[in-house]
Amino acid sequence: MRLDVLTLFPGILEGFFTSSIMARAVERGLVDYSLTDIREFATDKHHKCDDELFGGGAGMLMMPGPVSAALESVGARESRVVYVTPGGRLFNQAYARELASEEKLVILCGRYEGVDQRVIDRYVTDEISIGDYVLSSGETAALVIVDAIYRLIPGVITGESLDEESFEGGLLEYPQYTRPAVYDTMVVPDVLVSGHHANIVKWRMKKRLEKTLLYRPDLLQGKGLEGELRAMILELIGQGGEA
């Protein structure tokens, strides 16, 4: 996958692409990226990229000229272009999987009051919000989207590691433990050290349901769970698992 990220502050993003799993994905050729500094496309000596709002109002807006020129430089007209904004479609795991199937994505990071609407109308295919709150940095939101997407690219992370993560199968992930088996009087659940694979699978599923009922019961709506899973849910509700 090719990722072209357009920003006024490329330094915020650089460390992410040169660290940890992403760095290895880049080294292996699974991810290719560029960070484009929008200021380089400003036409005045001060590299000005923002101006006051027509109609008045607080704050400044990113000007269409530099942003458009930056988008043209990465072939945005022939690409899927993501603009991160609180006013966009809510991002989720299904959306991440959809974007991960693209060969190329252009991601535009907003600042201040955002980007002139004419840029959005001409270039943007996806306006995406990462949640019902406002950030001062479009770069932060862009990194959330990039992180959710690239790890789904085949070969970046093993399929086994992805299968039981939160939101896979519409459930949150189960609790996990590592050595030592006893830490400060707290003990790992017996089933996990029993070696009984079927019991471990059942325990993990029950814990996924329990956590989903507790924190995200909305994920279970309309799932039509039957058989053993339904029995587990009824048992948990009887124990107060919906509290």
Image: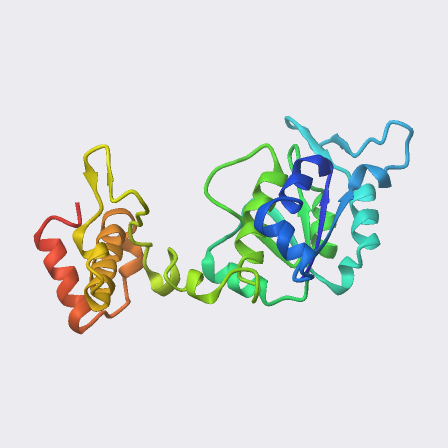
**Residue 179 pos. (x, y %):** 31, 45
Residue at x 19%, y 64% (from the top left corner): 199
Residue at x 25%, y 44% (from the top left corner): 181
Query: Image quadrant for the N terminus?
Result: bottom right
Q: Quadrant of residue 28?
A: bottom right
Residue at the farthest left position = 238
| Left or right relative to 107: residue 162 | left
**59 is higher (above) or lower (below) than 166:** above
| Left or right relative to 159: residue 22 | right
**Residue 14 pos. (x, y %):** 69, 41
Asked whether residue 85 appears in the rendered view, the answer is no
| Left or right relative to 37: residue 170 | left
The colour scheme of the drawn protein is rainbow
Query: Image quadrant for the C terminus?
Result: top left
**Residue 58 pos. (x, y %):** 64, 26
User: How many numbered marks appear?
Assistant: 0
Residue at the farthest bottom position = 227
**188 is higher (above) or lower (below) than 231:** above
Residue at x 19%, y 72% (from the top left corner): 226
Q: Quadrant of residue 9?
A: top right
Asked whether residue 61 appears in the rendered view, the answer is yes
Q: Quadrant of residue 167?
A: bottom left
The one of 224 and 150 positioned closer to us in this rendering: 150
The one of 192 and 16 positioned closer to us in this rendering: 192
**144 is higher (above) or lower (below) than 160:** above
**Residue 63 pos. (x, y %):** 77, 38
